Image: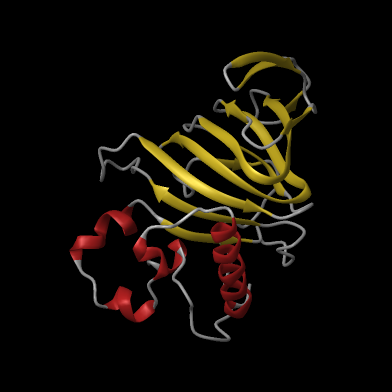
Amino acid sequence: MKRSEINAIQKRAKEFLTKHKWTLPPWAYWGPQEWAKRGDEISEIKECMLGWDITDFGSGDFAKRGLFLFTLRNGNLEGKSDKQYAEKIMIVEEMQETPFHFHRHKMEDIINRGGGVLKIELYASTPDEGLSDDDFEVSIDGIKRQVKGGDVVTLKTGESICLEPFVYHRFWSEEGTTLVGEVSLVNDDNTDNRFYEEVGRFPAIVEDEAPLHLLVSDYT
């Protein structure tokens, strides 16, 4: 992805979040010069990968296959934090796909916070990490529901689903762009994700202009 594209996505995201009355922490709005002034006091932000996260999953087409995320709070599976939970806010554009994946460790609640309608296609995982046709159970706003492989769950504003580890899911938005929340166990995008197809979780960036705000992948 080009840095200019990432900067434009960040600008759109700030406008969309403001529209939905969602305010990010003050450090979210720092530029590179402000980050450069900081020392060990921001170690939790870096070690737990808090902040801006924009990916096209290696597709080269963010609008078709991509996702905007901002990690608000998180622990660390390497023991650098005692925090056992995480929270993200995401923006899913209309018909923009996040491809099939599951998490080996993380249980998560996915919440439609407003805007469009969120569609989530579900499969249980086979022992060799394929897609299973078997029925399985999910919880939607605390109500148990039986689903089978390939079922699509619809989440309207205010609705949520709990996804256990090893449940494949892909999602997209219909009827507009959707603001999506995630509350979960500790998130680790380096070791805990299993994508059904081979994808690039963090984009290679062409630095055609200066960063507006650093991404979590910029910290290193």
Residue 187 in sight in this render: no
The percent position of residue 169, horizontal first and vertical second, equals 68, 35
* Residue at point 20%, 69% (across, down): 39
* Residue at point 58%, 35% (across, down): 110
* Residue at point 69%, 41% (across, down): 196
Q: Relative to 42, is 134 above or below? A: above
The percent position of residue 74, horizontal first and vertical second, equals 37, 44
Q: Relative to 44, is 5 above or below? A: below
141 left or right of 148? left
Residue 30 in sight in this render: yes
Q: Nearer the viewer, residue 111 or 106?
A: 111
Q: Nearer the viewer, residue 151 or 28?
A: 28
The percent position of residue 19, horizontal first and vertical second, equals 59, 58
81 left or right of 205? left
Q: Nearer the viewer, residue 31 or 189?
A: 31
Pick the quarter of the image with the C terminus: bottom left
The percent position of residue 62, horizontal first and vertical second, equals 70, 63
How many numbered marks appear? 0
Pick the quarter of the image with the N terminus: bottom right
User: Could you say which quadrant of the image residue 11 lies in?
Assistant: bottom right
